[in-house]
Amino acid sequence: TLSAWPKLLYGLSLIYAVMIQRSKYPGCGWSNPLDVTIADWRISTNFAQDLLNEYEGIGGSSKEHAGTGPAWEAMRYIITNVHLGGLIPDYWDKRILTAYVGRVCSEEFLSRKTATLFGLSAPDSPELEEHHFNINMLPESNSAASL
């Protein structure tokens, strides 16, 4: 639903940021260096937004569709295995990504008043200022342990 979009966008953006950052720590990051680009992020976020819009377009917010939600399983599968599947050949790395995407692309995460991922709160508002505030609250530096 439209109210889910800000949290979903924020969550997917954090996942991509973590993927890029973890590549900097070879010993405790990804098993293989990842070549993740802004284009990969755009493909995944555009797909997620299209799926949410399609759900909304078929009456997803009506009482007859209440509780069904968008096709979360399809969204998780396509983002994890199709959009990013070729970038992550290692089985254990793919399991980590599957867990991250599974957490964000779920009704449980998006329906919480305060949804958190990696200890960071996802904004509940589509207002750009709230997103800027959250981003400015991020630490200036990080360690491999925080990822």
Image (cartoon, rainbow, N blue to C red):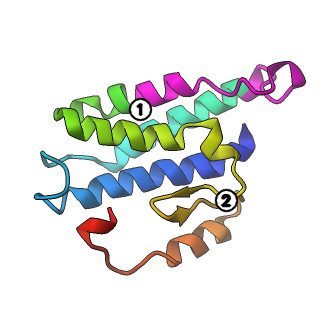
The residue segment tinted magenta is 56-78
Nearer to the camera, 44 or 103: 103
Task: Bin the neighbour count of mark 1 within 10 Å (Cα to Cα): few under 14, some 14-19, many 20 and up.
Answer: many
The x, y position of residue 81, in whole percent, is 34, 26
Task: Bin the neighbour count of mark 2 within 10 Å (Cα to Cα): few under 14, some 14-19, many 20 and up.
Answer: few
Q: Residue shown at 51%/51% (left/top)?
A: 11
Q: Are marks 2 and 1 in contact (CB under 8 Å)?
A: no
Separation (CA) of disc 2 from disc 1: 24 Å
**Which residue is most to the bottom?**
140
Question: Which structural element holds mark 1?
Answer: helix
User: From the viewer's perspective, is residue 112 above or below residue 68?
Assistant: below
Nearer to the camera, 86 or 71: 71
Tag 2 residue = 114
On screen, residue 139 versus residue 33, left or right, reads right
**Which residue is most to the right?**
63
Give, as a three-letter code, the residue at label 2: Thr
Nearer to the camera, 86 or 97: 97
Q: Give the quadrant of residue 58.
A: top right
Q: Nearer the viewer, mark 2 or mark 1?
A: 2
Q: Residue shown at 31%/34% (left/top)?
A: 84
Tag 1 residue = 79
As for residue 40 lying within the magenta part, the answer is no
Q: Residue shown at 81%/22% (left/top)?
A: 59
The x, y position of residue 92, in whole percent, is 22, 38
The x, y position of residue 21, in whole percent, is 27, 61
Q: Quadrant of the N terminus?
A: top right
User: From the viewer's perspective, is residue 49 above or below residue 32?
Assistant: above
Nearer to the camera, 142 or 12: 142
Q: Quadrant of the C terminus?
A: bottom left
